Image (cartoon, rainbow, N blue to C red):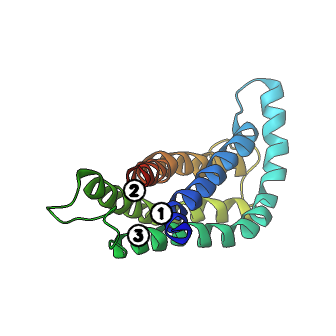
Amino acid sequence: MAGLALLRVAPLLSATSYITFTFSEDTFIRPLVHTGPSAPATELRRHANRILPAHNTFVRRGLPFIFLSYPLSIATAAANLARQDDGSLSFAGDAAPRARAAAAFYTAGMVLSVLHFPFGPAAMACLNLVGQDKGVDDDPKADNTAAMAKWLKINAIRGLVADFPSWVCYFIAFLCVMS
């Protein structure tokens, strides 16, 4: 029973970890790119342009986490869908409404978790630009800060379109199977 409960909550736990990662990235990086035309903001931008290339060092350390947490959510959601023998999770027409809802929400969560990956190429292109440090300090449209701001936008959209909705689906699925 405990093993089954762990299987049921596993997609939610791994989704919680990646949504926390997404939120943390935004929380800690956004202040570096929030600049404006004032003299202090221009000075901040110059400093941010020098600091941001080091971000890739941290990204490399976080990639194993990313490459483990999303597949873990996807795999454990699929395992939940494959394990329908206790009646708490089923697509069968004669199954209880909660069992059908749980199956639907695990499926939706799994699809939304997969949706994270199509954003990858554009996001990695922005991070590569920052890492190459080829930005022009005096051009606010072509410096490291601009590339990181573009990445933050992609990351926020991905979080709102894929990551957070997948977490919500896993949460609802877990509530359905455990009630």
Residue type at the position of mark 3: Asn
- Mark toward the start of the polypeptide (2 vs 3): 3
Q: Distance between the residues labelled 1 and 2?
A: 7 Å
Relative to 177, 44 lies left or right: right
Residue at the limit of the structure toward the top, as seen here: 38
Q: Distance between the residues labelled 3 and 1?
A: 6 Å
Residue type at the position of mark 2: Val
Category of crowding for the residue at label 3, using alpha-carbon neighbours closer than 10 angstroms: few (below 14), some (14–19), many (at least 20): many
Residue 90 seen in render? yes
Tag 2–tag 3 contact (CB < 8 Å): yes
Q: Mark 2 points at which residue?
A: 177
| Label 2: which secondary element | helix
User: Residue 169 appears at what percent x and percent y?
Assistant: 41, 51
Residue shown at the point (79%, 32%) measured from the top left: 42
Residue shown at the point (29%, 57%) measured from the top left: 99
Tag 1–tag 2 contact (CB < 8 Å): yes
Residue shown at the point (69%, 44%) measured from the top left: 139
| Label 1: which secondary element | helix
Q: Which circle marks residue 175 in the picture?
A: none
Q: Name the residue under label 1.
A: 8
Residue at the limit of the structure toward the left, as seen here: 93
Tag 3–tag 1 contact (CB < 8 Å): yes
Q: Distance between the residues labelled 2 and 3?
A: 10 Å
Q: Which of 152 and 140 is in front in this view?
A: 152
Q: Mark 3 points at which residue?
A: 80
